[in-house]
Image (tube, grey):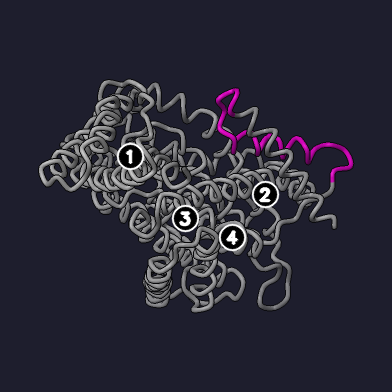
Amino acid sequence: MHAVGMVLFLVVLATSVATGARRWRIPAPSLLVLAGIAVAMVPGAPAMHIAPETIGLVVLPPLLYASAEELSLRDLRAVWRPVTVLALGLVLASAAAVGALAALLTPLPLPLAFVLGAVLASTDPVAVSALGRRLALPGRVQVLVQAESLFNDATSLVLFRVAVTVAVASSAFSWQGAVGEFALLAGGGSAVGAAVAGAVHLIRRRTADPVLETVIALVTPYAAYVLAESAHTSGVTAVVVAGVLLGRAGHRLSDARIRLQLHAVYAVVVFLLESVVFSLVGLELPTMVRELPTGSGWWPVQALAVAAALVGLRVLWMLPLSAALRPSGGRPSWRIATVITWAGTRGVMPLAAALSIPLADAHGTPLPGRPLILVLTTAVVVFTLVVQGLSLAPLVNRSGLALEPEHTAREEQQARERLARAGLEHLDALAELEATPEHVLDRVRRGLQARLRHAEDAEESDGGAPALAVYRELRREVIDVQNTELHRLYDDHRISDTTRRQLQRDLDLEAAALSAS
C-alpha cells in the first residue's frame, strides 16, 4: 500500500512539474530530478530504495521501444560508422578513464574503481531521448546522439559484467571470454529482437482491431526484453532492434485510426514512466548520501571530477567524427562536437547497473566501496540531467546548428503542396477514365486546390447519400496516394523525418475523420 501511495504521489508531482516545465520552457527531466531531491530533503520523508529489477523489467522496455521507433532508419544508415565507433571505442575509453581517475581520487580499490567506470561508460537512451525530443537539431546529429545511446548497451554490459566478476570473485580477466560474451549479448539480442519484430509483423498484418493492436504494441517491448534476458543475451538490444524494425514498417501495418490511438496511448505511458523514474533519481541521492560511511565527505568533488572527465574525453572523440556529420563532408567542427558531447547524458540505466552490484564478494565479505559507487553514479546522473539538461537548448541555439523555425515551416509547406499536387494528378487520371462522377471529382479537387491556396475548405452540399459515399471513398483513395508520395519524398531525402511524422499525423487525422463521419 505504501508503494502504491508513493507511485501516485510521484505521478501527481510529475504532472505538476511537467506543467511548469512547459510553461517555463525547461526540460521536464531536469526539473523532475530537482523536485525529487527537494522532496527527499524534507524532514520525515521516507527513504527510497529502487530495485534494479524494477527499472530493468518495468520501466526500460517501453521507453527504449518508443525511442527506437522514433529513430530514422534512413539517417541511421548515413551515420552507422560513427555510431559503431562510439558504441565500441568511446565506451571502452570512458570506462578506462573513469576507472583510472576513481582509483586515483577515491578510496575505491582498483577493481571497484573500474566497476564505476563500466557503470558510467555509456550514455543513457532514456535521458537522451527525453532531453533531445524538442531540440531542432539536424537529422544526422539527432540520430547519431540517439543511436549511440541505444546501441552501446552490449559494450557497457560486457564491461560491467567483467568488472564485477573481477571485483567480486577475483577471477582472471580473459579477452577471449569478453569478446565471446559481447558477441552473445549483441548478436543474440539482435536476433531475438528481429525474431520478435517478424512475429509481431505477421500478427499485426492480420489484425484490424484497435484494442488488440494497442495490447500488442504494449506487450512487444516486454516480450523482446524477457525473451532476450531468458536466453542470456541483451534485452536492451532486443528491444531496440524490434523497435527500429517495427517503427520503419508502422505505416504499412496499421490504418490511420489505429496509428493515432497507438500514438496517444504510448504518449501517456512514456510520460508516466519518465516522470516517475526521473523523480526517483532525485529521491535516491539524499538517501544514498545518508548511508555513506564516515570519511566519504569528498564525494561531491569526486563526482564532479568524474563528470568533467567524461565530458572532456567525449569532446576529444567527437571532434574527428564531427566531419562525418556534415552533408558534404569537410573539416571537423567544434560546434558539432560540443553539441553532441553535451547531449550525451547519463540516466536510469547506469543507476540500475550500480544498484545491481552484489552486496558481498565470493567469500561473503561486504564490498566496502559499494555505497560510494552508488553515490558517485547517482551524483553524475544528476549532474548530467540538471546541468547539461538545463543548458543544452541554449547551447544548441548559440551553436547555430538548430534548424530555424522558418526552415522547418518552409520544408513542411513545400511538402504539403507536393502532396496536394499528387492528389490532383490522381484526380485528373480518374477524370480521363470517367470512372467517377464529375461532381464528386470536382468536390475533392476544390478541397485540394484550397489547400494549395492556404485557404480553408469551403462547405459543400452533400449531393445525396450515394454521392457522399463515393466522395469519402475517393478522398480515402487520394489520401493513400498522398501517403505514397509522402514516403517517396522521405526516401528521396527531400524532407526530414520530423516533417514526415507531422504530415503523416495530419493525413491520419483526416482519414480517421472520414471513417468516423
Category of crowding for the residue at label 2, using alpha-carbon neighbours closer than 10 angstroms: few (below 14), some (14–19), many (at least 20): many
Tell me the SS state at disc 2: helix
Q: Main secondary structure of the magenta part?
A: helix
Mark earlier in primary sequence (3, 2) = 3
The residue under label 2 is which amino acid type?
A: Val
Give the Cα separation between the discs numbered 4 and 1.
28 Å
Which residue is found at the position 64% from the left and 30% from the top? Answer: 19
- Is residue 317 among what the camera can see? no
The residue under label 4 is which amino acid type?
A: Ala
The residue under label 3 is which amino acid type?
A: Ala
Looking at the rendered image, the disc whose residue lies closer to the viewer, 1 or 3, is 1
Do callouts 3 and 2 mark residues in contact (Cβ within 8 Å)?
no
Do callouts 4 and 2 mark residues in contact (Cβ within 8 Å)?
no
Give the Cα separation between the discs numbered 1 and 2.
32 Å
* Outermost residue toward the front in this view: 464
Residue 78 circle label: none
Q: Magenta stretch: give its range.
A: 22-45
Give the Cα separation between the discs numbered 4 and 2.
13 Å
Tell me the SS state at disc 1: helix
* Outermost residue toward the left in this view: 432
Name the residue carrying label 3.
95
The residue under label 1 is which amino acid type?
A: Val
Residue 375 circle label: 2
